[in-house]
Amino acid sequence: QEEQEDQDQEEQQACLRRSCLRQVPDRILKNSSLTYVCLEGNHIPSVPSSVFACWPKLQWLDLRNNHITMLPAEIGSHRCLEMLLLEGNPIPGLPP
């Protein structure tokens, strides 16, 4: 049972910190059970609007220290998102 819990937890979390990414990888976009995603310290310039539809259970999203200049408007209507970390990005403002 512990192994199953560990596997479930792995399927719910994705940490790709400092991985030289230039976009959100398709392989994690396809995982709809993610609740925690860390993409801190990459070279991502934008977040696709599909992210929030792809991750309906997402509670924590760490996008610190990327090159993000704007966020999709859909972020404001995500029901589960509790924590959004954006420090170190050149974002002039949040969507309405």
Image (cartoon, rainbow, N blue to C red):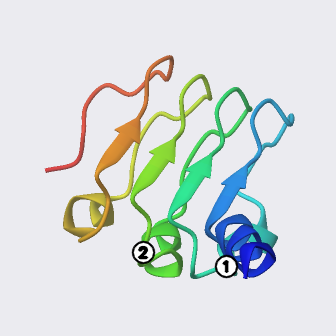
Please identify the residue farthest to the right as the structure is shown: 20
User: What residue is disc 1 on?
Assistant: 31
Kind of residue indicated by mark 1: Asn
Q: Residue at x 86, y 34 (%)?
A: 20
Q: Quadrant of residue 78?
A: bottom left
- Counting from the top left corner in percent of width and height, residue 83 is at 34, 44
- Counting from the top left corner in percent of width and height, residue 35 is at 50, 65
Q: Is residue 26 above or below residue 89?
A: below
Secondary structure state at the residue bearing disc 2 = loop
Secondary structure state at the residue bearing disc 1 = loop
Please identify the residue farthest to the left as the structure is shown: 96
Q: Is residue 13 above or below residue 53?
A: above
Q: Residue at x 60, y 29 (%)?
A: 67
Residue 73 numbered tag: none
Judge left or right: residue 78 versus residue 85. left
Q: Nearer the viewer, residue 41 or 36?
A: 36
Classify the position of the N terminus by image quarter: bottom right
Q: Residues within 10 Å of mark 2 (few under 14, many from 20)?
A: some
User: What residue is disc 2 on?
Assistant: 57
Please identify the residue farthest to the front as the structure is shown: 1
What is the count of numbered marks?
2
Q: Residues within 10 Å of mark 1 (few under 14, many from 20)?
A: some
Marks 2 and 1 in Cβ contact (< 8 Å): no
Of the image marks 2 and 1, the number of the one nearer the N terminus:
1
Disc 2 from disc 1: Cα separation: 10 Å
Q: Residue at x 66, y 42 (%)?
A: 39
Judge left or right: residue 63 versus residue 41. left
Q: Nearer the viewer, residue 83 or 1?
A: 1
Kind of residue indicated by mark 2: Lys
Please identify the residue farthest to the top as the structure is shown: 88
- Counting from the top left corner in percent of width and height, residue 89 is at 49, 23
